[in-house]
Image (tube, grey):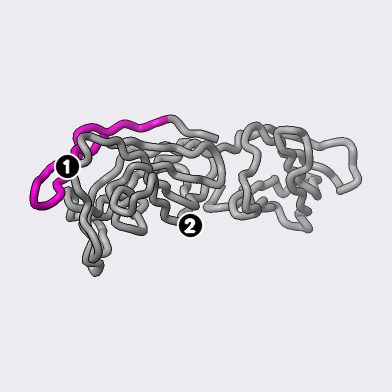
Amino acid sequence: MNDKNLEVEVTEESTTEVITLRDPDGEIFDQDSLEGDTEVAFEILGRYEDDIATGEYELVALESRGSDDPIDSTTITLDAECTITDVFWAAENPDMDWEKRSSAWDAHAAIIIENKGTIPSLLTELEWAGAPVAHLQSKDAQSYYHEVRLPPGETTVYSEGPVYRTQNSIQSLDCSEYDTEPMTVTAVTQVGPDPSYTQQIEYGGEQSCELAIVESSTDGGEN
């Protein structure tokens, strides 16, 4: 499996001419001819806009497209299992790779997403419920859209906006209206459940709004 394709290789001695990939329901997901080669590739990520079915897939080797008798077959698990393991605030982590040309760069956030699955997923949106910037705009949540591939392993994603912002050119957040409030970020992914992560943010200060992260926890993903 590479960045987006499932690659299948047969031996040079094999009489296989066609490889069929069947989904967990037994339906043909894709089929390709070797055409004298020993390798075919099936596009897994980016083929559809919506989620693909995850689970046990079957690879079937055939002598021809019309053949009913497989030469060989094997099952593989295609799944993406993403978890948000940490969320960083730029003001507390200035040495990370922030885009510092923005005047509000220190209000941005970065998240670490770990994919323990066997195939990549695609991050399409980060929703920040209860974020300071959402309170500033009198909203329940603030969303930013992304297009970031999440291969197996860890990926760092930087927010597209100032999540921890408490003031802009028009107004400032009145922190006296808040005590300790939860902020939950949910990663909307193309494949697999949508993971989330919650920080408890303490609001304080009199002349200006002061924030402090007092607790953090990762939450289970939702389909």
- Which of 169/58 is in front? 169
The three-letter amino acid code for the residue at tag 1 is: Ser
Residue 147's disc is 2
- Measured in 3D between alpha carbons, the distance from the residue under mark 2 to the one under mark 1, in whole angstroms, is 37 Å
- Residue 107, given in percent of the width and then of the height, sits at 23, 55
Secondary structure beneath dot 2 equals strand
Magenta residues, dominant SS class: strand
Marks 2 and 1, the one that precedes in the sequence:
2
Q: Quadrant of the C terminus?
A: top right
What residue is rendered at 74% in x and 48% in y?
30
Q: Which residues are magenta?
A: 200-219
Q: Verify whether residue 189 appears in magenta.
A: no
Q: Is residue 23 left or right of residue 65?
A: left
Q: Is residue 80 left or right of residue 61?
A: left
- Which of 104/141 is in front? 141
Q: Is residue 38 left or right of residue 69?
A: left
* Residue annotated with mark 1: 176
